[in-house]
Image (spheres, rainbow, N blue to C red):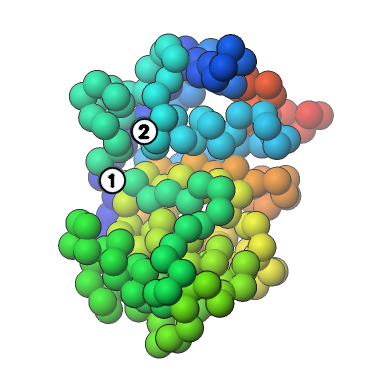
Amino acid sequence: MKTANPTTIEITDLVKDIKGKRIIDHVNLHLESGKITGLKGVNGSGKTMLMRLVCGLITPTSGSIVINGKRLGKDITFPESVGILIENPAFLDAYSGFDNLKLLASIKHSVGPEEIRQTIARVGLDPDDKKKYRKYSLGMKQRLGIAAAVMEEPDIIILDEPTNALDSDGVAMLKEILHDQRERGALVLISCHDLPTLQELSDEIYLMESGALRPYEEED
């Protein structure tokens, strides 16, 4: 297993407005390697938007995101080593799970067919299954999305509601994978609607309400 490079993310006074509505409201957050940070909040609280901002998929209205001293949107366009699962996984319908991941892996050439097969098996899917993605169940799609996020063992892993559509075995699989990713030193940011699972996974939890972020407390 590849050791992750030491990584820090500094989010400072981050604001995102869309059509005159404040979606992210002056968020400050420090993230670092070897920790899993959890986000708790109802739908529409801003969790997914914050993750999109950290990934460089959208630009902030004001404030900054600095990754290892490089400002996102200025010094770098995207994080240099990141695995992402935000909202629903999206793959090519006519391709198998293996072929979809092989296509993704061809961008960086950092993993080969054997590593892809191992990752597919790790999430509880069959790497030899020729079934097209369009015929996957929701749970299978979610497992493949998790595989895509971790297969290259990136320094940063961002997972938005990764337990969606997973059965109890799938949740156990996810916990094991994230434990291993933390152990190798990855920086992990996750959101999860299931509080006990989030508490079990996370080193620290933040509550998001109406775009604002604060440390989660038990009475929340």
Q: Is residue 109 above or below residue 85?
A: below
Q: Can you give x and y, in whole percent of width and height, for residue 100 in the image?
A: 36, 69
Q: Earlier in the sequence, mark 1 or mark 2?
A: 2
Q: Residues within 10 Å of mark 1 (few under 14, many from 20)?
A: some
The residue depicted at 39 percent of the width and 35 percent of the height is: 57
Asked whether, in this view, residue 84 is left or right of residue 44, the answer is left
Q: Residues within 10 Å of mark 2 (few under 14, many from 20)?
A: some
Cα distance in 3D space between marks 1 and 2: 12 Å
Q: Can you give x and y, in whole percent of width and height, for residue 64 in the image?
A: 38, 17
Q: Is residue 89 above or below residue 51?
A: below
Q: Callout 2, which amino acid?
A: Gly
Corner quadrant of residue 118: bottom left
Residue 123: tell me if it is visible.
no
Q: Residue furthest left?
A: 109
Contact (CB < 8 A) between labels 1 and 2? no
Residue linked to disc 1: 81
Q: Residue furthest right?
A: 219
Q: Which dot marks residue 56?
A: 2
